[in-house]
Amino acid sequence: MLRATQEARSVAEAVTSLGRGPAGINFYLLRKNLAPLERFLAERLAARPDLRFVEVRDRFGTRVAAVPSNVIPNAAGIPRAQVTLMLGGVPQGDVRVGVSTEAIDRDIEALRRSLRIKIAAAVTLGIGLLVVGLFYSLRLIRKNRELEHARQSAARAEYRVNLGSGLAHEIRNPLNSMNMNLQMLEEELQGVPELEGGEHVEMLRSMQGEIKRIANLIDVFLQYARPATPQLEVKDLNDVLTATARFLQADFRQSGVDLVLDLEPLLPSVELDEGQLRQALLNILGNARQVMQPGGQVRVATRAGMGGEVVVEIADTGPGIPADSIEKIFEPFFSKRTGGTGLGLAIARQMVENHNGRIEVDSQLGKGTTFRIRLPRRHNRAGVAAPGTKASR
């Protein structure tokens, strides 16, 4: 009805303009010149398909003009709007505009559809935002838990390291005193002819050996508990392996185990801490030698990896590692060898990881074990030194 009322006002303004006279609206002159008015009314209806009819009546209720002329404005069921023709504050007649009920229904249905679409879109958007907010909140909670767990793990690890270092220091001091006292006692006993070379001398030496073993174990533990920051230099990895094999050659020869080098001659240089990497190699090779029987072989090979890294393979022909133990061999203090500390492989992995590398293990019972060390050639920082010099920090 708002549209009909607006259209009625527009027609009323046109009629007032066309029929304005000295005493009001001159409907006599308006009737004699209906063509412009009817053309105007027809144009209005053509532009507004939702309107059914437009008619103009004078102040006596007589129809002056109507478009279309065959519509009965007072017919029931046709909604209409009526606007009074005013001129100089005096009523001059009225304009009536009928509205199509089908158009109203279509408009109402269109409004309903639009409203349903907007409500559905708003609900969908709201649910989407709620789901996103929920997942984001869960992610924040999970991230917060991970950070808290990492903080607590770091705190526990630092506490264990400090505790272990403190205990190692407290144990080492009395061990040194005991060793010194045993040495003094041995010297005094050697000065007594009737006691020289007796069973008590062997007991003293056995005690000194155990003290030395415990001191070595403390050193190894401290090495694992407080690893040094690697001092990286660009090195020829083949040279490092050759020097390590030369150092171990006599020990392997005495055990009846062959140590064979199969080094890639065009191997790229690697940025590494020679001391830490040699310690990792010594631990792995030492474990291999200790578990092998005479006549066995340990093969050390190098090659360039597919991902641009450098690979060191240490393959032995020993007894192999049981499947249930492969995941545990790098854990601290895990050892199935009598007299083993269980820290050698743990330290080896730690030192390789200090180089942003990793260790892989393949083993078959009765056939042997292969340790595979993968090292990146360079580390992500500026100022890498030339071969044989330390990298800048």
Image (cartoon, rainbow, N blue to C red):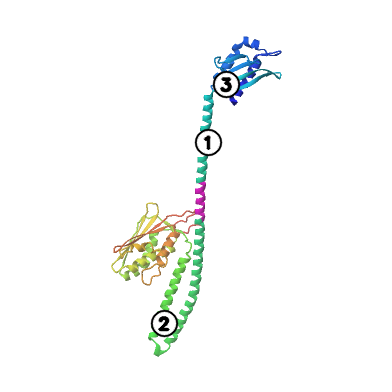
3D distance between C-alphas at marks 3 and 2: 125 Å
Query: Quick one: label 3 or label 1, which is nearer the N terminus?
Result: 3
Residue 225 as seen in the image, left or right of residue 47: left
The residue under label 1 is: 118
Q: Which quadrant of the structure image shows residue 246?
A: bottom left
Numbered tag placed on residue 204 in the rendering:
2
Residue 255 visible here: yes
Asked if marks 3 and 2 touch (Cβ < 8 Å), the reply is no
Closer to the camera: disc 3 or disc 2? 3
| Residue farthest toward the front in the current orientation of the protein | 76
Query: Quick one: label 1 or label 2, which is nearer the N terminus?
Result: 1
Task: Name the spot of residue 307 as percent of width and height, x first.
Answer: 39, 51
Residue 139 lies within the magenta run: yes
Amino acid at circle 2: Leu
Other-residue count near label 2 (Cα within 10 Å), few / some / many at <14 / 14–19 / ≥20: some
Amino acid at circle 1: Lys
Name the residue nearer the viewer: 99 or 294. Answer: 99
Asked if marks 3 and 1 touch (Cβ < 8 Å), the reply is no
Residue under the point 52% across and 37% down: 119
Numbered tag placed on residue 98 in the rendering:
3
Task: Name the spot of residue 339 as percent of width and height, x first.
Answer: 38, 72
* Placement of the N terminus among the 4 image quadrants: top right
The stretch of residues the image draws in magenta is: 132-144
Query: Quick one: label 3 or label 2, which is nearer the N terminus?
Result: 3
SS majority, magenta: helix
> Number of marks in the image?
3
